[in-house]
């Protein structure tokens, strides 16, 4: 049975007191992310393991040939499936999606699928008859905060790493058939990824409310009377200047925050989606600064993904096999002058 993760009074007081002194438990600054590690499978394409601090997400991409939708005969299909098992945190229950998991699933789908990060038209094989169905299975293994950021990043990296099988169309008319070639026959084809969405979550803390909670917790009456819950506090306060903004909050910080906002952007400084939750009012200047910070993080993360992909390609290309298997012919380029002389003769 799933149980809620509620911090104790001592943990609550310690975290809020540290934030009032501009200190985080892991000694990071308010604008600093945790260590990010991206590793790809050495045996198959489209399998990626992402560690964001102690948060761990595994994504696997698969593809199969199916029929397109009747209302979109020229587009392929792209599906994202998320699963958070009780192994990640006891607050999740197997076979039943919690409200938090539903929000994470919808934001990831909105950030990647609805932003058209993957060109679905390139998945069309035969208009109205055959197309590719690309499926992304997202498995959250460890939960220490930042599930949304790690999941969105892992899906984007897996799409860039995946290679679908090459196909051939044999026959004509109604007798046309689609032949899927294994990797041993033809080199797999990468997906057409138009941009790389990267999600960054900002957690908001009202420092005046945090100070009030600390005063109530340390008072003599706090030992005999229960402390007020966050939903009992009047969040419609005008003290927005006292708002502290944290990037990539840990699990303890997520449990104590008064609100949060997730911003998905890419290296082109395009905002793919914005989602804000919580009852805390935030100034528009703060929201704009968060958007600018999200684009800066997206640029750094995208460069990291490209670098990891390059390293994986070098590790796989033992003996220059991929270079020899590609379709481009360098000899025609090198002998262009000879070919021109032959045409003149």
Image (cartoon, grey):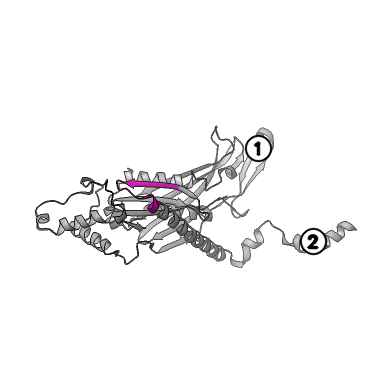
Q: Position of residue 123 (x, y in %)?
A: 58, 44
Q: Position of residue 216 (x, y in %)?
A: 15, 55
Earlier-in-chain disc, 2 versus 1: 1
Answer yes or no: is residue 85 visible. no
- Label 1 neighbour load within 10 Å: few <14, some 14-19, many 20+: few
Taking 303 as reference, is 54 left or right? left
**Above-or-below relation of 68 to 303:** above
x 48%, y 47%: residue: 112
Magenta extent: 273-287
Taking 256 as reference, is 192 left or right? right
Where residue 176 is drawn, which disc sits there? 1
Taking 161 as reference, is 242 left or right? left
SS at badge 1: loop
**Above-or-below relation of 156 to 172:** below
Q: Is residue 274 magenta?
A: yes
Q: How many numbered badges does the structure rendering display?
A: 2
Tell which tag, 2 or 1, sits nearer the viewer: 2
Q: Return the residue at label 2.
A: 336
Q: Nearer the viewer, residue 21 or 196?
A: 21
x 12%, y 55%: residue: 222
**Above-or-below relation of 327 to 128:** below
- Label 2 neighbour load within 10 Å: few <14, some 14-19, many 20+: few
Q: Nearer the viewer, residue 178 or 283?
A: 283
């Amino acid at each position: 049975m799933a149980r809620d993760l509620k911090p104790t009074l001592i943990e609550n007081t310690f975290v809020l007191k540290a934030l009032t002194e501009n200190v985080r438990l892991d000694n990071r600054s308010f604008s600093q992310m945790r260590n990010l590690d991206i590793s790809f499978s050495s045996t198959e394409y489209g399998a990626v393991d992402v560690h964001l601090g102690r948060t761990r997400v595994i994504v696997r991409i698969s593809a199969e040939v199916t029929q397109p939708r009747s209302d979109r005969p020229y587009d392929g299909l792209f599906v994202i499936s998320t699963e958070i098992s009780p192994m990640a945190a006891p607050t999740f229950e197997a076979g039943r999606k919690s409200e938090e998991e539903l929000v994470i699933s919808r934001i990831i789908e909105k950030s990647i699928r609805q932003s058209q990060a993957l060109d679905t038209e390139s998945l069309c094989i035969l208009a109205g008859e055959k197309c590719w169905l690309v499926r992304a299975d997202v498995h959250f293994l460890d939960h220490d905060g930042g599930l949304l950021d790690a999941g969105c990043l892992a899906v984007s990296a897996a799409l860039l790493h995946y290679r679908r099988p090459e196909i051939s169309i044999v026959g004509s008319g109604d007798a046309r058939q689609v032949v899927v070639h294994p990797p041993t026959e033809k080199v797999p084809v990468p997906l057409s990824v138009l941009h790389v969405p990267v999600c960054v979550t900002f957690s908001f803390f009202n420092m005046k409310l945090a100070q009030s909670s600390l005063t109530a917790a340390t008072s003599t009456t706090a030992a005999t009377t229960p402390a007020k819950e966050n939903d009992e506090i009047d969040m419609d306060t005008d003290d927005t200047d006292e708002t502290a903004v944290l990037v990539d909050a840990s699990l303890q910080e997520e449990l104590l925050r008064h609100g949060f906002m997730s911003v998905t952007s890419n290296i082109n400084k395009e905002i793919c989606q914005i989602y804000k939750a919580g009852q805390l009012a935030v100034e528009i200047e703060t929201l704009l600064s968060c958007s600018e910070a999200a684009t800066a993080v997206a640029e750094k993360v995208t460069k990291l993904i490209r670098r990891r992909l390059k390293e994986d390609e070098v590790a796989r290309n033992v003996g220059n096999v991929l270079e020899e298997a590609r379709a481009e012919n360098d000899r025609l380029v090198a002998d262009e002058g000879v070919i021109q002389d032959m045409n003149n003769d």
